[in-house]
Amino acid sequence: MIKILSDIQSSKVKDLIPEKKMKNKGVEMGESSERLAPVIMIDGLDLEKKDFYKELEEPLQIFIIPTYIKRRNPTAYMPKMVSIGPYHYGNPDLEPMQFHKERALIHFLRRSPTKATKEQYIDALICHAPQLRKSYENVKAMERGSQTINDYAPIDPIFGDRGHNLNYNYVMEDLLLLENQVPYQVLFILLTVSEGCVEEAATNILSSLMLAPPESKGNHLLDMYIKGMLGERNRQQPNTKIPASKLIVFGIKFKAVGTYRGIVFDQSTKTLSLPSIFINQHTVPRFYNSKVYELRVGTNTELNSYIHLLDVLIQSVDDVSSLRSQGIIVSALDTDDAVIKVMNELTKDTVPGDVDSLSIEIINELAKYYHDKDGKVTTFWIWLTQNWVKFLVAGFLLYVLTGIQAVYSMLSFHLRH
């Protein structure tokens, strides 16, 4: 379009339509280009240009999502923190991460055991440039360490331990966007040049990094992640879920304690002691700020660990109601539905990798107890425990109605005699 508009005043376009004829048609030179668009478009065409899609040997691996799909949920397809492909490069909102991407590249190049030069990386990538370019749709040009080495400062805001935990969910969310991918081959080339390893070793390393099955290959990070997500990854473990409402059915009692260090599961008394959490309209921003501070510069991970523990226990409104009845959740909100919305906000960004040993130990103990009971307690008993109040009310009403009937019968007898 830029080329087309720049040709408006060119003699080449003027020559196509005589000036006199243009004036007769009411078109003055320098007037809006809209009337000349068809002529300019035809003039700018290269009839020898090869069709992009016909030249593709394989289907596109990384393509632009149609606008009508993006409109359904625009934020779901846009990176929020980092871009790694050409489609979103230069986005002003992602500019702060460019500084850290450059630092990461420097660390990667320095830690190479083969001491490969920058030229070696560039040469290896240029050899595959035509093939890599075909991985993308509508991209005309492409600009040109070892996992056991921890060569970042502990306080590094992005790559340090705390920085990694704090940003992990957001970065992974961006790295798994379809429009934010780089071809698998790019990562493979960089790794083999850096490490000097054979193809099999490089494939296994990338499989591990991409949460995919061992020795598997894919088109890009998202493709590899899907393979692992669908169960092909042997080491993948399901998330632990232990609903609080079912624990109560299985005989567990909850007890409120004052501090995080008071958390304990006493199997002899079947009592789980937890700190109370007070929830109102200010809870979310207060916890967000507290958790961010703890994960970045705090001296412990108690808050993140406690929220992770609550995430394990709360799966539904019934779980919120059960914890509220036991004094673990103290709510100033109107309904349990409102409480679970707050809890979902608190737990959505919890970092499982930054949970302390106390919380892990409690979760393991609860999981063992839960799975020992699950399936052994009869369905009828669970149904009865969940509906005992209804039975109590029904029994009371039956008792009252029976009494009324007896009184009515006595009155009827006396009135007849």
Image: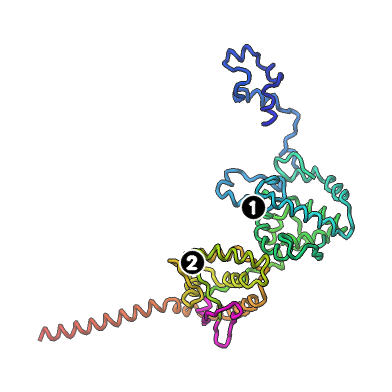
Camera-side residue of 375 and 255:
255
Of badges 2 and 1, the one in the foreground is 2
Residue 344: give its label: none
Left or right, 97 with reference to 151: left
The image position of residue 213, as x and y in percent, is 73, 62
Residue 136 in view here: yes
**Magenta-highlighted residues:** 246-271
The image position of residue 117, as x and y in percent, is 89, 52
Q: Quadrant of residue 376?
A: bottom right
Left or right, 146 with reference to 343: right
Residue 80: give its label: 1
Specify whether residue 260 is painted magenta: yes
Specify whether residue 63 is painted magenta: no
Looking at the image, residue 260 lies above or below residue 221? below
Q: Residue at x 49, y 63 (%)?
A: 281
| Nearest to N terminus: mark 2 or mark 1 | 1
Which residue is identified by label 2?
Answer: 280
| Quadrant housing the C terminus | bottom left
